[in-house]
């Protein structure tokens, strides 16, 4: 142009379709092709990883349910144990008070007999049959707890293995994608660099060298107009 700026776009950075026919290179197209290769199939990778992550999340929920099975067995056994202890304690108290009533009746102490009967009526109605049933329930709960723990451990082990496989699958998918994209990216980058190299001419290099020399000369002139001449690492004023 009139101000000395090259507007011919010989390198083709603006991406003209007729760049080769007009003598321009295709630097712009090569650069954009490199960017496309870098982001190639990123959406497909994300969608696949999302599917694997959702499946992995379901596996984790399954693992949590197996842990919950452990907790259920523990709580059932604890509940039956407390019920058995409560029934046994009430039965022992009723037995003690009944024995005391018999003794007071034999010794003809009606007042004490009345007090003991009132205490007996205030206690829970527990029979020996109730104590036996509470004991059987407690023993059954122990067996149930053990079976639940075994079942949960087996399923937990299988779910843990599958979950680990899902994590490996995610990492493998990602690594293969990065490897494939990196190969294509290197090819596209090499093509772009080659296109840039072909677009640069010797006149461009000479012009760039002349501009660099002029800048260096301007930097070597002091504000007072004297030039600095470097000699063996020292600056001499000329």
Image (cartoon, grey):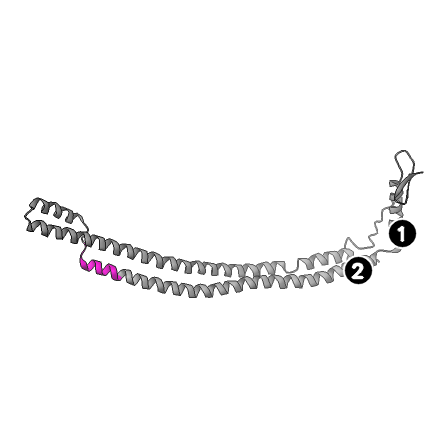
Residue 26 shown in magenta: no
Q: Which residues are the magenta region? A: 126-136
Decide if residue 116 is in sight here.
yes
Residue labelled with disc 1: 206
Q: CA distance from mark 2 to mark 1?
A: 20 Å
In the picture provided, is 167 more to the left or to the right than 230?
A: left
| Foreground residue among 185 and 169 | 169
Above or below, 238 relative to 20 = above
Q: Indicate left or right for 56 with 94 as reference.
A: right
Q: Secondary structure at mark 1?
A: helix
Give left or right: position of 27 versus 45: right
Residue 116's tag is none
96 or 173, nearer to the observer: 96
List x then y, in percent, for residue 187: 73, 62
Quarter of the image where one finds residue 92: bottom left
Q: Nearer the viewer, residue 167 or 82?
A: 82
Q: Which residue is mark 2?
A: 194
Residue 146: percent from left, percent from top: 35, 63
Q: Residues within 10 Å of mark 2 (few under 14, many from 20)?
A: few
Q: Position of residue 93 (x, y in %)?
A: 19, 51
Q: Residue placed at 35% from the left, 59% from the top?
A: 73
């Amino acid at each position: 142009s009139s101000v000395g700026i090259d507007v011919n776009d010989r390198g083709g950075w603006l991406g003209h379709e007729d760049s080769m026919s007009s003598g321009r290179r295709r630097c712009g197209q090569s650069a954009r092709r490199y960017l496309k290769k870098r982001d190639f199939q990123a959406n497909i990778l994300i969608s696949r990883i999302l599917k694997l992550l959702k499946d992995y999340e379901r596996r984790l929920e399954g693992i949590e349910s197996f842990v919950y099975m452990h907790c259920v067995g523990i709580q059932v056994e604890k509940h039956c144990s407390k019920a058995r202890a409560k029934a046994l304690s009430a039965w022992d108290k009723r037995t003690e008070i009944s024995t005391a009533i018999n003794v007071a009746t034999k010794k003809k102490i009606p007042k004490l007999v009345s007090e003991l009967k009132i205490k007996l009526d205030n206690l829970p109605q527990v029979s020996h049959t109730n104590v036996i049933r509470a004991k059987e329930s407690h023993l059954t709960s122990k067996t149930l707890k053990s079976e639940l723990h075994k079942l949960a451990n087996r399923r937990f082990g299988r779910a843990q293995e599958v979950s680990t496989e899902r994590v490996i699958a995610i990492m493998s998918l990602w690594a293969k994608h990065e490897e494939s994209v990196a190969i294509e990216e290197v090819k596209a980058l090499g093509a772009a660099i080659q296109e840039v190299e072909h677009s640069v001419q010797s006149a461009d290099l000479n012009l760039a060298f002349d501009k660099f020399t002029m800048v260096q000369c301007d930097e070597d002139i002091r504000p007072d107009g004297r030039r600095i001449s470097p000699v063996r690492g020292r600056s001499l004023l000329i």
